[in-house]
Image: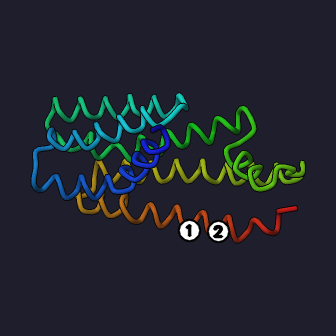
């Protein structure tokens, strides 16, 4: 049940910007809040990690604000919340190692040598910088851009940037694998 909820939460998050953009032209924002409510519920059910439960509470706060104000802005802030949550997860590993990237690397290379740790730490710092930048752009698009630009950035461009970062790390990684 947990795995299915987690998978559905990520899938819902992936398609969330498109659903909100299409919905805002047809429905009042308060009725679209149910989309975010489903995402928040899936997050809460699907994760054992406290940080994702806090994110679900944050999403619930956005739902309440949307319903109370009948405004689309809180709905458009969800990508900012996701970036802030991911930043917290990755930054926590810098403060209390191992980092997320090191844990992922150790799945493939359980005997990751000590000189590989600085590489994965550096990659984690790059991801943290990405989440700050991406979250900042998500915030800007929510506050200042049209709904179409918000949906384009948060529902397409951000994913292309994530893919480019993953591909860049993958291309550079063999130089540092042992």
> Where's residue 4, x and y in %?
44, 45
What is the tally of numbered marks visible in this picture?
Answer: 2
Which quadrant: the N terminus?
top left
Task: For label 2, count other residues whose C-alpha is less than 10 Å away and answer few (under 14), some (14-19) or many (20+).
Answer: few
> Where's residue 110, x and y in %?
82, 49
- Marks 2 and 1: CB-CB under 8 Å? yes
Q: Would residue 101 appear left or right of 16 to someone viewing this image?
A: right
Closest to the observer, 21 or 13: 13
Task: Tell me the residue at 50%/52% (across/down).
Answer: 133
Q: Secondary structure at mark 1?
A: helix
* Residue 32 figure quarter: top left
* Residue 57 figure quarter: top left
Q: Would residue 145 appear left or right of 174 to someone viewing this image?
A: left
Task: Tell me the residue at 38%/65% (across/down).
Answer: 156
Task: Tell me the residue at 85%/51% (across/down).
Answer: 112
Question: Could you say which disc has been placed on residue 128 in the image?
Answer: none
**Looking at this rendering, what residue extends furthest in the bottom direction?**
171
Circle 2 sits on which residue? 168
Circle 1 sits on which residue? 164
> Where's residue 93, x and y in %?
68, 38
Q: Would residue 103 appear left or right of 9 to someone viewing this image?
A: right
Q: Secondary structure at mark 2?
A: helix
Closest to the observer, 116 or 109: 109
Task: For label 1, count other residues whose C-alpha is less than 10 Å away and answer few (under 14), some (14-19) or many (20+).
Answer: few
Q: Would residue 142 appear left or right of 93 to someone viewing this image?
A: left
Task: Tell me the residue at 60%/47% (across/down).
Answer: 128
Q: CA distance from mark 2 to mark 1?
A: 6 Å
Instruction: Note whether 75 is above or below 54 in the view shown.
Output: below
> Where's residue 94, x and y in %?
70, 39
């Amino acid at each position: 049940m947990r795995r299915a909820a987690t998978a559905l939460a990520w899938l819902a998050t992936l398609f969330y910007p498109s659903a909100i953009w299409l919905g805002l032209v047809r429905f009042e924002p308060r009725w679209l809040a149910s989309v975010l409510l489903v995402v928040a519920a899936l997050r809460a059910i699907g994760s054992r990690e406290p940080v994702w439960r806090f994110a679900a509470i944050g999403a619930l706060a956005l739902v309440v604000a949307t319903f109370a104000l009948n405004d689309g802005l809180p709905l458009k802030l969800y990508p900012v919340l996701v970036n802030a949550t991911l930043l917290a997860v990755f930054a926590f590993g810098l403060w209390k190692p191992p980092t997320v990237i090191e844990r992922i690397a150790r799945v493939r290379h359980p005997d990751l040598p000590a000189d590989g740790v600085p590489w994965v730490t550096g990659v984690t710092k790059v991801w943290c910088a990405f989440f700050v930048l991406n979250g900042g752009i998500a915030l800007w698009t929510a506050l200042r851009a049209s709904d179409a630009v918000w949906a384009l950035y948060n529902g397409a461009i951000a994913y292309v940037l994530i893919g480019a970062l993953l591909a860049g790390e993958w291309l550079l990684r063999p130089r540092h694998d042992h």
